[in-house]
Amino acid sequence: MSLGTTIAIMTSETADFRMVPIGFVSGSYTEPSQIPKGPGAVHKAEGVLELKAELEQGLMDIDGFSHLIVLWVFHRSDGYALVGRTPLDNLEHGVFATRSPYRPNPIGLTVVELLGRDGPRLRVRGIDMLDGTPILDIKPYLSSIPAESLKLGWHG
């Protein structure tokens, strides 16, 4: 996939949003089956977020953050299902209550640990994306929600 690839997302009959990747993931996962899944999954894989060279200035001061939020595209996902099963149980759940790649807008979100920066390349740990995944945006991870207040799961 070239850096000039445009991703078009139709959100209604009257609005057309076009997003162009700011870069791509370089990592070791080439197939979805290689990526650990589920609440007990450990995401320690390292990789590189390779941004377009002309966007490098936008990384100024990113080194001050330990973790980053990466918004990306499920570029190998085809179509969507509003209800489906997860690897965690046999019950059906709504797509918006899962991390399924088969979404109306195939957007993924991952929090990664920033290990270092080399120009427009960010070395990170915790990727769960495929090699070549288009990156839409990167934001510093800031959360005011204490870990003990988070609820994980569908029942309880």
Image: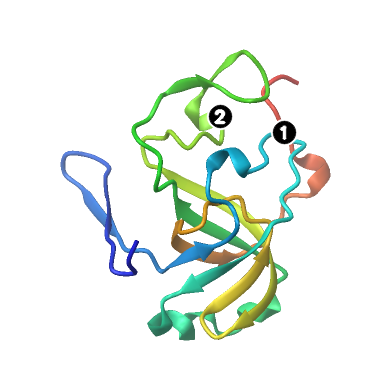
Question: Dots 1 and 2: beta carbons under 8 Å?
Answer: no
* Above or below: residue 100 compared with residue 109: above
Q: Position of residue 144 (x, y in %)?
A: 71, 55
Label 1: which secondary element: loop
Can you name the residue that lies furthest to the left here? Answer: 14
* Above or below: residue 15 compared with residue 45: above
* Closest to the observer, 89 or 46: 46
Mark seen at residue 68: none
Alpha carbons under labels 1 and 2: distance apart: 11 Å
Please tell me how many numbered marks the rendered image carries: 2
For the N terminus, the quadrant is bottom left
Residue type for callout 2 = Ala
Label 2: which secondary element: helix
* Above or below: residue 54 compared with residue 81: below
Residue type for callout 1 = Leu
The residue at which mark 1 appears reads as 152
Mark seen at residue 97: 2
